[in-house]
Amino acid sequence: MTHAKPGAHGGGDAHHAPMSFWQKYIFSTDHKIIGIQFLFVSLFFLLVGGLLAMQIRWQLGFPGKPMPGGSILPQTMAPGGVILPEYYIQLVTMHGTFMVFFAIMPLLVGVYANFLIPLKIGAHDMAFPRINMWSFWLALLAGLIMFAGFFVPDGAPRAGWTMYAPLSARPDLSGVGVAQKLWSVSIVVLGLSSVMGSVNYITTVINHRAPGMTWFRIPLSVWALFITAILGVLALPVLQGAAIMLLFDQSLGTHFFDPVAGGQALLWQHLFWFFGHPEVYILILPAMGMVSEIIANGSRKPIFGYHSMVFAIIGIAFLGWIVWGHHMFMSGMNPTLGSTFMVSTLLIAVPSAIKVFNWMGTMWRGNLRFHVPMLNAVGFVSMFTIGGLSGIFMAATPVDIPLHDTQFIVAHIHYVLFGGSLFALFGAITFWYPKMFGRMMSEPLGKVHFWLTFITYNMTFFPMHIIGMGGQMRRIYDPTIYDFLKPQQPLNVFISYSAFALFAVQLLFAFNFLWSLKFGKKAPQNPWDDNGLEWSLPNPAPHGNWEKTPNVYRGPYEFSSPEAEARGTDFLPQSLKLPTDHDPLPAPLPATH
Amino acid sequence: MHWWLPPGASTFAAPIEHLFVAILILTGIAFVIVEVGLAAFVIRYRARPGRKALYTHGSTRAEVIWTAIPAVTMVVLGIVSNHYWVMIKDKRSVPPNAYHIGVHAKQFEWQVTYPGKDGKLGTDDDFTIRNQLHVPVDQPVAVELSSEDVIHSFWVPQFRLKQDAVPGMHIVAWFQATVPGEYELGCAELCGMGHYKMRARVFVQTVDEFNAWSTQQAAGGTE
């Protein structure tokens, strides 16, 4: 085998020299391996978050009854299997924390920004592979610090994943000493990891695109991940700063957030949500990007309105910075400010509508192939729509008054993060599984998993709108002590049974994922007949990706074009040179690390 | 089983419910367009032998339509919503004739202070009762919210009123109850271990009943 362009490749010998297991899989600087590392770790935290959710649902469905298997928990959490109020708050706090920071965010960004960006733009690796490696290890460290909270005196944090001060700042008020500090430390470490990753993604997209990969030939997944990285690099430091202030309040006796000595309780909320709303878009934009790839592929049609899809991503990201106050309509923030935030929030419906209708436009008059990724992508569009529409109720400030801090918002966030992000991830994991592991996941199992998930998911989360309208507050340990909530307890029981079923169905996915690693069908080179550059490589792709940097001749969505038909197919890979194509000018920088 | 907002018992209930229904209709239309459209496309355009996908990159006209309609709808919705928002929550919206009651939240109880005979808070004849909010019907009531320790949230579902009580801040929220009866006041913001049981009884009474009760309490009597 020959080295392409020796010297262009920083550590050229890394290309083919045999590496030990440790070099290859543990201290790897290969963006693909780092993506896979993120995948395993964040799937683990997804499982942890799911197990916490099951306990929440047990308590809400059957308050005060001993939980099956709960007797293995220590006396300080669930004596005799009966969940204690203090443990219940740990459950809701850590479910939110793990799912947002250690499951969905790393699954979307850690896994797919790492894995897809270089492969889809024709780069040999990330711009800064060692920083990239550190980004993974710091994320894992942050996760372990967070996880440790369950094993220290007083147990895990008890102030909700939003950590509203002064409850989070004062151990005498929350009843938690060590773990509240661990939360702050973990978030600071995670922010560091996230910024390292984001800097890498931004630099790589700007500098390491293959010749011919112009800005408007970049696949939408990469556009979304690029904009997400910009959000990350600007938003995470705000959270880090706030977490450091919180840590000082918790341990050094400062009072940034405690009015007892001149602090401001609302300052935390402003800082948290100034980070938190862009964070919400960090959790959905990559999903939208990957769904765009899958829908174009499954429809065998170019994406409908590529340019407006790009501008909608940018528009959502921009609006994300000026809507944080909609989390604070009831907070005591000046109501006049509430009017401003309402209008900016309602405007998010515009780019969101563009995206949904353009996905539908892509499917219109297509030739739809319902492979598992496509099923999940269409599931994403239909469920994200519900999550987006329910947001309008809460954006309209007067209607938000009865809905704020009730189960209605719990329904909303899960329609966006589960119905949205997680369905997109089921699609993405299945779609790029062959590229990661060289094998296919089982198609029949994937279909069964999709349909059962789609049904049990709606049974779980749709009724939450109803009990939220009925007034059930978030994070309450026992709704049945309220007269106005008692009549709807049967619905709480129904939701709990549905949630258990939903969890059980996810074991199918876990089985399919793990089983296929070893026993899945060997993947052909281009199993989905896709145009992306990544499919011009073998499965899995080698370290360094390309022997020779590919040339790009067209956009990524030329399905069913006349040129494709002339070849007797309905797709046209980006790097395929037709007789009429001219080679693009060489890239200004070598597309290597 | 109850499938709707709890029965309203304040003057805010009707406008909020109208707006709720309006949004339900708007989002319902969008919901049907998207979901029925998706279902139709899934059935109609599924792959079959000999079927060919249409090669198109989009339609500016269609995109302008589905950009403009949501944009206009949202701006109108914002203007209408703001009208009610100002009416309910604006600092100047508290009616001048409102009866002021102090509500001091602390882990995990509501301390309700009544103005006594002189009708003014902060005077000697004020009296305080734990976890009982008595208000006269058909009379604007202004709740002066404060907190001892952490953030709590004053929430009476039937009044459609929710307002956080924040330590270090003095926040006034008002409402006018319309239906005499007994209700519950819950805490809507996680405030610690006892968050779930931070509950008070709310009694909406006729003006005569309320005055009689208030006089009796001010005299140090029990119920």
Image (cartoon, rainbow, N blue to C red):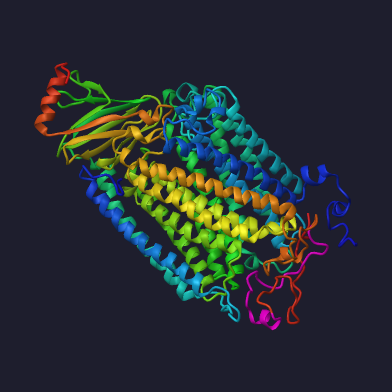
Residue at 58%, 42% in the rendered image:
A101
Residue at 52%, 50% in the rendered image:
A418
Say if B138 sits above or below A530 in the image: above
Q: Nearer the viewer, residue A165 or B195?
A: B195
* Residue A560 location, quadrant: bottom right
Residue at 41%, 39% in the rendered image:
A474
Queried whether the magenta region covers residue A171, the answer comes back as no
Quarter the N terminus of chain A occupies: bottom right
Q: Which residues are magenta?
A: A545-568
Q: Nearer the viewer, residue B145 or B157?
A: B157
Q: Is residue A558 visible?
A: yes
Say if A516 sits above or below A271 in the image: below
Q: Position of residue A182 (x, y in %)?
A: 59, 29
Queried whether the magenta region covers residue A562, the answer comes back as yes
Q: Position of residue A199 (x, y in %)?
A: 66, 49
Instruction: Looking at this view, name the residue that lies furthest to the top.
Output: B220
Residue at 26%, 26% in the rendered image:
B112
Q: Is residue A127 visible?
A: no
Q: How many marks?
A: 0
Quarter the C terminus of chain A occupies: bottom right
* Residue B146 location, quadrant: top left
Most common SS among magenta residues: loop
Q: Is residue A537 left or right of residue B114?
A: right
